[in-house]
Image: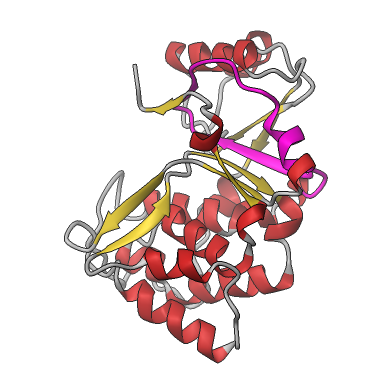
């Protein structure tokens, strides 16, 4: 969980995680942060949780731009939370997360945003992924709109060129064909997701990630990690390797009271 700050609402959401996620508290939680936290924040989070708690300062890698990217001269039409902050977050979740040496010890990583809520009882999704030999546990499907994010549709040509140049045989061609419509691109609403670390460390997946990163499309056009995650699954994961939260009726909400 990437946390910008500690609040009473965050504490309430964490308590829901403890009470609703049925793993007998065997799964630890790792708090990633980029801003300085006070000692009281560390203590408060540690005392709140019934499971093992760890902290990792990712400020140095979070704020890295792609190679040959000029942050002073490059223009972007997307301005939220400062010129680059949100786009740096996208790059972190899409690329940098799986490069962190501290995470290589884990088989699976569940992402929860600080405004995510597990609303009811959840079985242990890590056990289900092991049982199904899955590489990804997806959230709802959503769309990004060209009208709202100019340059979104450029991903279609970039993806097509990549497939041809690298002789890629997409694992889920139907999923890939559905991804792009006239002015929309499908995505996974990935403020919740579970990822198999080994899958995202595979050579072919890393090559795709690095290629997308080198286009600077994340920073120029706000190509989101949600869209890029969807395309990654279409290209490299078999359909039976991707599980879907709605199919299991696991109650969840994002940015809810």
Residue 33 lies, with reference to residue 88, above or below; the image says: above
The answer to whether residue 202 of the structure is visible from this angle is yes
Q: Say which of 142 and 149 sits in front.
A: 142
The answer to if 129 sits in the magenta stretch is yes
* Range covered by the magenta-colored residues: 104-130
**Which quadrant of the structure image shows residue 145?**
bottom left
The C terminus: image quadrant: top left
Residue at point 53%, 26% (across, down): 250
**Residue 109 at x, y = what percent?**
68, 41
**Residue 138 at x, y = what percent?**
54, 44
Residue 77 lies, with reference to residue 7, above or below; the image says: below
Q: Say which of 236 and 50 sits in front.
A: 236
The answer to if 114 sits in the magenta stretch is yes
**Which quadrant of the structure image shows residue 45?**
top right
Q: Residue furthest left?
A: 147
Q: Residue furthest bottom?
A: 165
**Residue 153 at x, y = what percent?**
29, 71
The N terminus: image quadrant: top right
**Residue 178 at x, y = what percent?**
38, 65
Q: Say which of 201 and 157 sits in front.
A: 157
The answer to whether residue 44 of the structure is visible from this angle is no
Residue 39 lies, with reference to residue 103, above or below; the image says: above
């Amino acid at each position: 969980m990437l946390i910008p700050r500690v609040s009473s609402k965050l504490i309430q959401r964490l308590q829901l995680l403890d009470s609703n996620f049925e793993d007998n508290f065997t799964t630890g939680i790792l708090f990633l942060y980029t801003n300085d936290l006070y000692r009281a924040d560390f203590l408060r989070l540690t005392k709140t949780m019934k499971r093992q708690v760890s902290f990792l300062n990712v400020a140095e890698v979070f704020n890295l731009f792609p190679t040959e990217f000029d942050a002073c001269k490059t223009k972007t039409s997307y301005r939220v939370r400062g010129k680059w902050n949100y786009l740096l977050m996208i790059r972190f979740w899409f690329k940098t997360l799986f490069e962190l040496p501290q995470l290589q010890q884990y088989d699976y990583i569940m992402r929860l945003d600080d405004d995510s809520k597990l609303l009811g009882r959840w079985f242990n999704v890590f056990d289900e992924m092991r049982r199904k030999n899955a590489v990804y546990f997806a959230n709802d499907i959503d769309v990004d709109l060209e009208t709202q994010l100019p340059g979104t549709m450029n991903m279609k040509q970039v993806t097509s060129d990549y497939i041809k140049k690298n002789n890629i045989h997409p694992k889920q061609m139907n999923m890939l064909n559905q991804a792009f419509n006239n002015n929309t691109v499908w995505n996974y609403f990935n403020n919740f997701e579970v990822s198999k670390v080994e899958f995202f460390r595979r050579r072919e997946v890393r090559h795709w990630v690095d290629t997308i990163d080198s286009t600077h499309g994340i920073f120029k056009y706000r190509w989101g990690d949600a869209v890029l995650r969807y395309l990654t699954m279409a290209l490299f994961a078999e359909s039976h390797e991707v599980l879907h939260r709605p199919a299991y009726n696991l109650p969840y909400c994002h940015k809810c009271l």
